[in-house]
Image: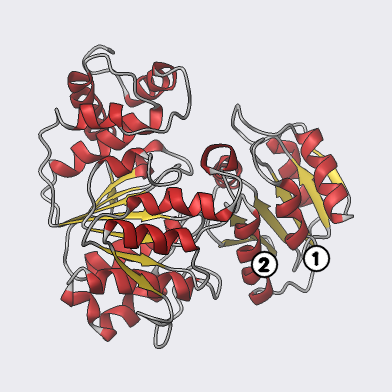
Amino acid sequence: MLPTGAPLSEWLTWLEKLHPAEIELGLERVRKVLDRLPLQRPNHVFLVAGTNGKGSCVAMMDALLRAAELRTGVYTSPHIIDYNERIAVDGHYASDSEIVAAFETVEAARHGIPLTYFEYGTLAALVVFSAADLNAWILEVGMGGRLDATNAIDPSAALITNVALDHCDWLGEDVETIAAEKAGVMRRDIPVVFGDADVPQAVVAQADKVGAKLLLRGRDFTLEGVPQPGLGGDFQVGNAAAVLALLDASGIVAVRDPELIARVLPRVRLTGRGQCIEQDGVEWLLDVAHNPAAAEALTNLLDNRRSSGATTAIVGMLDDKDVEGMAKPLSKYVDSWIAVTADSHRALPAAELARRLANASDRPCLVADSLEEALESARRQSGNNDRILITGSFYLVGPVLQQIGADNP
């Protein structure tokens, strides 16, 4: 236990060492602590699961609910730059003091139970939300669904964006197995929207088993009349349609207003997701895509933002990611790669990443010894109408945004 008044930075360092494993899926420990926390739940608790697009759906859901004059609490992960990004109350990041007070509350209830960094943060977010008199909590699932810490609290409705291969060491080696894990957010009689047109059988089977009210694209809702969100990529219309279906099924009448929808969705922005920045005639495109399905989605954005110049891609990835699956769809848009070691102890070393990128794409790949070197190399070889693409991990996009001095969208 840290002394009273310890700053947030010390808490975060301490939390990293509290549990021997960075990830330990399971709900028993979280639920024990949760039962000791006097939380005041709102009318609506939304769980958002899926392989890709969770952050986009959370951002759109939050914007729509707040436009309808509902007060929201939003929990997301990981953060891009500051931990405070993970916990937002009514559109504003929680302050250091609010988060520290919540950590102290969790610690007082923990009684020695070992919690991971993510589990501790999840419980702290709920404490912050409970104290804020909110109408809705929006919780982004960290990994999977069934055993994720966010699933310790029963939702009133849930959204599963899609299912693709990612986190295979933890969730399974095939789409159906992963889908079964994500479908663990379902509960009896609650609406559950599956946002993708390709529906795994495991999702349908779990809905039937538990008695959830499964809503499917093409059967229960369509993309017709849904405006293009401010987030880049045509696929975001599908995410928006899923969000609207979930809010409608939850009985939030104000969000059915076409004028409100048309006004709000095109204004939604999200840091590091298809984020474009112009500097000195060069376009910087930052996207946290880190698996093959996300890379395919990124190609949609690149198709819609064709550049007349060359594209240099700076890439950093974690060691459990599918480098070849990322490189292949992007290679037709990338003229040269720069590999860098992402800012994580789980990062794939730049030299190994460069070898795999070059082999998978048949494009040259420079090895950068530091992020500063990677950025300088990219700037040096980029001129007017050229593009610098930053992708592969949250742990790369965040540090790049800090280095180039860009504001959040």
Seen from the viewer's position, the closer of residues 165 and 406 is 165
Seen from the viewer's position, the closer of residues 6 and 192 is 192
What's the residue type where badge 2 is placed?
Answer: Thr
Circle 1 SS class: loop
Sequence-wise, which precedes: disc 2 or disc 1? 2
Residue 332 marker? 1
**Count of marks placed on residues:** 2
**Residue that sits furthest to the bottom in the current view:** 225
The CA span between labels 2 and 1 is 9 Å
Above or below for 160 versus 121: below
Quadrant of the rendered image containing residue 285: bottom right
Quadrant of the rendered image containing residue 104: top left
Above or below for 314 versus 43: above
Residue 285 visible in image = no
Seen from the viewer's position, the closer of residues 136 and 185 is 185
Cβ–Cβ below 8 Å for labels 2 and 1?
yes
Quadrant of the rendered image containing residue 305: bottom right
Q: Position of residue 331 (x, y in %)?
A: 79, 60
Q: On the picture, is 84 further left or further right than 386?
A: left
What's the residue type where badge 1 is placed?
Answer: Lys
Residue 263 marker? none
Q: Which residue is mark 2?
A: 299
Circle 2 SS class: helix
Q: On the picture, is 136 further left or further right than 200?
A: left
Above or below for 395 versus 10: below
Above or below for 277 versus 132: below
